[in-house]
Image (cartoon, rainbow, N blue to C red):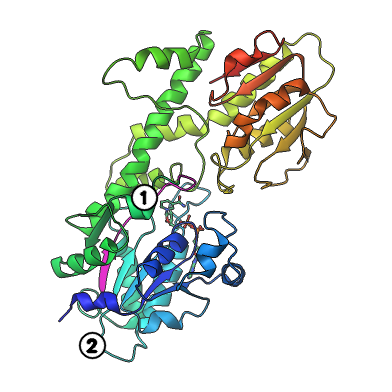
Amino acid sequence: MLSKEYINKDIVILGLGYVGLPLALEFAKNNISTYGYDSDLIRINQLSEGIDKNEEIDKMDILSSKLKITSNPECITDSNIIIVTVPTPITDDYLPDLSLLMNASKLIGEKIALRKNKNNKPIIIFESTTYPGCTEDYCAPLIEKESGLISGKDFYLGYSPERTNFGDKEHSISNIVKVVSGQNDEILEIISSLYSHVAKEGVHKAKSIRIAESSKVIENIQRDLNIALFNELCMIFDRMNIPSSEVFKAASTKWNFNNYSPGLVGGHCVPVDPYYLTYKAQEFGFTPKTILSGRAVNESVPKFLFEKIIKTLSNVEKHNSNNILVLGQTFKPDVADLRNSKSIELCKLLVSSNYNIFINDIKNNYPFLDDAKYIDNIEDNKINFLAIVLAVPHKNYISQFSNLIGKIEKNGYVFDITGVLDNSKFQNQEINYWSM
Ligand SMILES: NC(=O)c1ccc[n+]([C@@H]2O[C@H](COP(=O)([O-])OP(=O)(O)OC[C@H]3O[C@@H](n4cnc5c(N)ncnc54)[C@H](O)[C@@H]3O)[C@@H](O)[C@H]2O)c1
């Protein structure tokens, strides 16, 4: 019979990335015997020295942790609980790329087949974002095939979506409600109890694994669509020469108007997850219109900005240079993550123009595009710019932007994409200002 003692034995977090590492550290901090397993040897070696290349976790927090960091998958074999936090990207055709989930599921199947105590019935909890049904219909059969064991009899399934927001220190696993689900009521209780050790705000028990999977994917779809609406409104008002930020400010005085910031929607969650649901919906004979049109709007923002910048600058009559400085390359402010960054997409378009493109990122995290020049110390540099594009508003850019104003040519431009700068600073400076 299953019991809550499950939690007093070893657990494994499989995949120590943005999601897995903080989760594993949190379990270890709460005195749960935790292995952190990753197949990437470089990642394991770095973590063993306390280095998190994602810059999310401090060195001392890694080095002082009781977490057992390993590249040896044998830790899976006799563990009671295995939590899967591997990436779920999309293919070039915007379809779910389940290859990493597949490898993880096969590995788990292979290892649990070798467990010493055959009465040990491990619980395998997936955290990776996916479509409804993936855990039970895709992962479970792979585990069954590899292990010769039966889901719901020899091993059990659970799903608990990750919802923390990286770079956001206010919402970490310890202070958000965590959605949990299990294959049956007993498993759900064990999983709830496990996560209650780390999710101090509590857990929400979803009534099925499919419900939990669906809840995660719609969180990001809602965000994507809301931002898409604001991006589209910006495109409309820009044509009408009406400052959209002032429109949003006015509309926000209504009690039920929800304000969103327009901008570049990148990363591996918000622009990716909607395709998991639209893929599954299409399998059920339904083609989502709203979700996909929101996606199309957000995907079109780099091109909109590129055209806006080039057209605007072509109207500047007298200028000394063709230099444009783009600030920020990561997919969002104050993180080091370049995955699916729309600022990089904008830069790719800009380097195809006749302008000289200079790029800086405060995190010194660069994709190194051909034909772009990367500069680390802008203030020490003698180059002046016809325009500065604040693409990713890292906090330091905002606080130190006034130091860069002298680098902008007379009649030049500041393109403050997300409208974070104090516009009044540019008046009387013979510098033009534009934001979405
Ligand atoms: N990063 C976020 O902000 C975020 C937020 C919510 C949900 N998610 C979801 O969480 C999941 C993980 O995302 P992430 O950002 O942490 O990914 P990541 O790329 O940062 O980390 C994944 C880790 O898994 C490892 N890995 C891959 N296959 C493995 C295998 N077979 N065995 C062992 N290790 C393996 C990789 O080496 C890597 O270190 C995704 O489904 C993502 O959509 C991410």
Main SS class of the magenta portion in the image: loop
Location of residue 74 by image quarter = bottom left
Q: Amino acid at mark 2?
A: Asn
* 191 and 86: which is toward the camera: 191
Q: Quadrant of the N terminus?
A: bottom left
Location of residue 311 by image quarter = top right
* Within-10-Å neighbours for mark 2: few <14, some 14–19, many 20+: few
Q: Visible in this render: residue 14?
A: yes
Image side of residue 177 versus residue 424, left or right:
left
| Spot occupied by residue 382 in the image (x, y as percentages of width and height) | 85, 30
Mark 2 or 1, which is nearer the eye? 1
* 302 and 67: which is toward the camera: 67
* Distance of label 2 from label 1 (alpha carbons): 33 Å
Image side of residue 115 versus residue 107, left or right:
left
Q: Which residue is mark 1?
A: 163
Compared to residue 61, the image places residue 96 above or below, namely above
Q: Which residue is mark 2?
A: 119
| Spot occupied by residue 221 in the image (x, y as percentages of width and height) | 36, 39
Which residue is painted at 33% across and 15% down in the image? 253
Location of residue 285 by image quarter = top left
**Label 1 CB, ligand 1: below 8 Å?**
yes
| Spot occupied by residue 347 in the image (x, y as percentages of width and height) | 67, 35
Which residues lie in the magenta part? 156-168
